[in-house]
Image: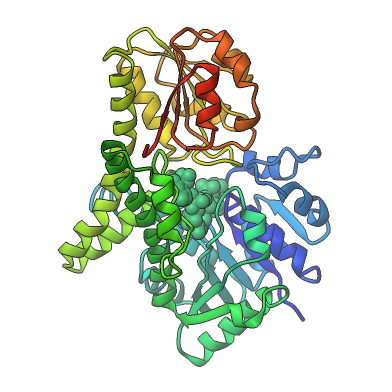
Amino acid sequence: MNKNIVCIGAGYIGGPTMAVIAKMNPDRKVLVVDINAKRIEEWNSADYNLPIYEPGLVDVVKETRGKNLFFSTDIKSAVQECDIIFVGVNTPTKMFGRGAGRASDLQYWEATAREIKEYALGDKIIIEKSTLPVRTAAAMDAILNDHARYNFTVLSNPEFLAEGTAIKDLLEPDRVLIGGPQTPAGHDAIEEAVEIYSAWVDREKILTTNVWSAELTKLAANAFLAQRVSSINAIAGLCEATGADVDEVARVIGADKRIGPKFLKAGPGFGGSCFKKDVLNLVYLCETFGLHTAAEYWMGVIEMNDHQQERIVSRLFREMFNTLANKKITLFGFAFKADTGDTRETPAGKVARLLAEEHVRLTITDPKALNNAQRDLADLDGIVYESDEYKAAELSDAIILMTDWRHYPTLDWQKIYDSMRKPALVYDTRNCLDANELRKIGFKVLNIGK
Ligand code: NAD
Ligand code: UGA
């Protein structure tokens, strides 16, 4: 009989991942539990006003919720009812004590391990879904199996989905990674996890490794992706200084099969909850193991990224006659990328703060992230939040396009131009608008890497 599954943590990872597992395993019961009652209420809302926005997510939840997918705050019953326990709680960067600003804060993870041990009434397979430092499974194993009445086997099954394409990534993954102890019990547990995914993923795409390789692979994969973004942004600065065009350079670099075209888009820098956190975690691990040169190498990826937003504001400052005070500047987009309302580590947040320091009159518009923007910038007075792009742009001196929302190129830019103060400037930090068209209308246009 197929075993029931629970996921502890109903966030960006737990919710969509379990919804897809439930959809593709209709004969398994899938529970998702969280300590945050409001979040669970939203997952259960009658009008499907879910706590996160992801294209296609509502359809999957409509298909499964109440049939074999259930959201609740009753962690104890869920742990008792299910033999397979995914843990997808948050692992933010630790902001205190040892490793502050670098290491992962594992307090939520450890609390979960202790809860599982306290409530369990039988053997369990525990699957790490959160991104964790290498050897976390050893700590979990030690907590769970110390004087335990039951056997707990800890696997690592990191998630590679990207926000905005979560459902597609889950349904058609490049690969699924399952790491486990190289023992008979470990191999059995790995097979249980493989069975869940083989309901829809080709067996050859399900890669199994030892548990430490799986934990480290997740950090390494994010670090490689982040490094590509920082590399192309480093080239973008040089393009601006020399007259080269970063999109042309990226196109040609990416045509080399050994390099490939993805993650070579210059922009305002990477945001999101994971790249910075995971690279910092890698830096911390390198330092912990005395690999200082490797630590510095990865730290450079973060430093380059932080520098990108400062560069954007410095260039704007120069182009707007070295004074921004009292000018109206409107940010088009606040989410860290298109198709998500998520604003964690968004480059727009840093740009907004740098502009606020210059006493800019700031307006922010975004189709999905305005509430989060308002929460993130609650300490700054006087910012206007406006969902209508045309109203947001009225009487602005400049627009900075921060997020590549698909509809931005299709807006009526003539109408926007007419309503702005002149000279009207557009700074397209995603290079997604037609700069020639904008110039024809009369805009002064700035791009990244051009
Ligand atoms: P999140 O903050 O959206 O969700 C985490 C949830 O865990 C929260 O709802 C929180 O209330 C809950 N939680 C915390 N402690 C708990 C406990 N003791 N019992 C029950 N619930 C508890 O975070 P997220 O974005 O889903 O990320 C979770 C993990 O997944 C992180 O390690 C992250 O690195 C990793 N990850 C995230 C993504 C992504 O796209 N967001 C992608 C891959 C991996
Ligand atoms: C990233 C990884 O792509 C996922 O594989 C991983 O599972 C996830 O982190 C995670 O661990 O949380 P995500 O952060 O959701 O996913 O989004 P990405 O599409 O990777 O974009 C990250 C940031 O890089 C965004 O701010 C995006 O605008 C920026 N980016 C991306 C660029 O500036 N240029 C590019 O070419 C690509």
In the visual, does 288 lie left or right of 404? left
Name the outermost residue toward the bottom: 184
108 vs 168, left or right, is left
Judge left or right: residue 285 versus residue 145. left
Residue drawn at point x = 74 percent, y = 55 percent:
70
Q: Position of residue 371 (x, y in %)?
A: 57, 27
The colour scheme used here is rainbow
- Residue 222: image location, x then y, percent: 42, 59
Say which residue appears at 44% left-offset and 34% top-offset. 429
Where's the N terminus, which quadrant?
bottom right
**Above or below, comparing residue 76 to residue 145 in the picture:** above
- Identify the residue at horizontal 53%, vertical 37% (top origin): 432
Q: Quadrant where the C terminus lies?
A: top left
Position in image of residue 22 (x %, y %): 74, 63
Quadrant in the rendering for residue 125: bottom right
Near-viewer residue (285 or 360): 360
Residue 281, horizontal then vertical, whole percent = 32, 57
* Residue 146 can be seen, yes or no: no
Q: Nearer the viewer, residue 300 or 48?
A: 300
| In this view, 402 is above or below 130 | above
Q: Nearer the viewer, residue 232 or 372?
A: 232
